[in-house]
Image: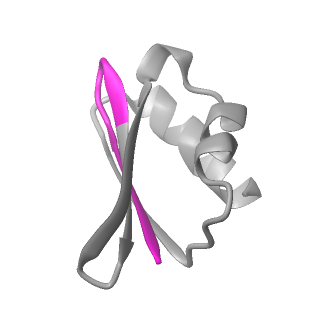
């Protein structure tokens, strides 16, 4: 599975893909994002890769670090 993240000024939109099919999609408000909030949303999912696109460089660094710890 692949986790995708689109970091915008208002929300971070996540999608989990199995092959070409999206199996889960959710948003977390960008200013309220924490590693804890992400871990709660990802319970039960294992993914091998992640893709991040962003217009908020500070959150990109934080999310990249958090994904390595999950």
Q: Is residue 66 above or below residue 3?
A: above
Q: Is residue 64 above or below residue 18?
A: above
**On the rendered structure, is 11 left or right of 62?**
left
In the image, residue 5 lies in the stretch drawn in magenta: yes
Residue 58 appears at what percent x and percent y? 49, 28
Viewer-closest of 40 and 49: 40
Percent position of residue 1, x then y: 47, 78
Residue 22 in the magenta stretch? The answer is no
Residue 61 place in picture, x, y as percent: 54, 40
Q: Which residues are magenta?
A: 1-12
- Left or right side of 54 for 43: right
Quadrant of image for the C terminus: bottom right
**Which quarter of the picture shows residue 9?**
top left
Vertical comparison of 19 with 44: above or below: below
Residue 7, quarter of picture: top left
> How many numbered discs?
0
Give the residue drawn at x 27%, y 32%: 55
Residue 34 drawn at (x, y percent): 64, 28
In the rendered view, does 18 fall on the left or right side of 37? left
Decide: is 62 above or below 22: above
x 43%, y 21%: residue:
29
The color scheme shown is one colour
Q: Residue furthest left?
A: 20
Residue at 34% over, 26% down: 11
User: Would you say the magenta stretch is mainly helix, strand or loop?
Assistant: strand
Residue drawn where x is 58% and y is 45% of the image: 41
């Amino acid at each position: 599975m692949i986790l995708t993240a689109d970091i915008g000024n208002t929300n971070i939109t996540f999608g989990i893909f199995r092959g070409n099919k999206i199996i889960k999609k959710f948003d977390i408000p960008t200013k309220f994002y924490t590693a804890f909030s992400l871990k709660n949303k990802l319970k039960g999912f294992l993914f091998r890769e992640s893709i991040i696109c962003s217009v908020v460089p500070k959150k990109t660094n934080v999310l990249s670090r958090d994904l390595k710890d999950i």
